[in-house]
Image (spheres, rainbow, N blue to C red):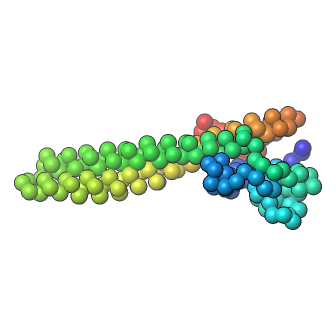
Amino acid sequence: MAKQRGDVPDTEILAALQERIERVARGGAPNAGRFCGYCFARLGATDHACKVCRRRIREYPAVDSIPAEVLLAYLAHRKKMVLWVNVFAFVGIFISILIAGCVVLLAPGAFKLLAVPVLLGGSWYFANLLGGGLGGYIGGRSGAAARLRRWQKYLRSRDPSREHIQDPDGSLLRLS
Ligand SMILES: [Zn+2]
């Protein structure tokens, strides 16, 4: 099926649906109902077009569940995200252990006790700062690339005649 003018790029669709489809994939929402035949966003009973990808139901008939391959694409994003957030959270905890160690070594007498609040507060602070910030950023980028690869593989299996792949600047694929 040819790309139509005004179509929303796949990268935008995937990002918009991450939370919703991830919830379905993890069992937090039922994989049953009325879904867009192109992007698998949930549709209202009377919708004639998808609000996410803007394709018409007439051209992409609604389906009653999300295919497993699509759920796996969204889980691939989550997996990368969890991995990188955790890696950087541990780096943050390690940094605060180092700082607390310095306090123990360098602070005089009773001031060595400051190592405890430094360790606890520092762990919390650096784990959030690095895990949530840097880890979230890297996880989001590499997760989006993994999700897009799986989605495109799924699209090719669904429609082998599909020639071009929507990734305007190729930036996501380079991050693999
Ligand atoms: Zn759609």
Residue at 51% x, 51% y: name it: 136
Give x and y (percent) for residue 15: 66, 53
Residue at the spot 29% in from the left edge and 49% down from the top edge: 96
What residue is rendered at 62% in x and 54% in y? 28
Q: Can residue 68 be seen in this view?
A: yes
Q: Quadrant of the C terminus?
A: top right
Q: Where is residue 71 in the image (x, y as percent from the top left)?
A: 69, 44
Q: Which of 118 and 42 is in front in this view?
A: 42
**Total numbered circles:** 0
Residue 49 vs 78, above or below: the answer is below
What residue do we see at 35% from left, 57% from top?
125
Left or right: residue 57 compared with residue 15 = right
Q: Is residue 56 left or right of residue 98?
A: right
Q: Residue furthest left?
A: 109
Q: In which quarter of the image is residue 43?
A: bottom right
Quarter of the figure with residue 114: bottom left
Q: Position of residue 52 (x, y in %)?
A: 76, 59
The quadrant of the image that shows the N terminus is top right
Residue 126 locus on image (x, y percent): 36, 53
Task: Determine the residue located farthest toward the right in the rendered image.
Answer: 58
Q: Answer whether residue 8 is visible to the viewer in this image.
A: no
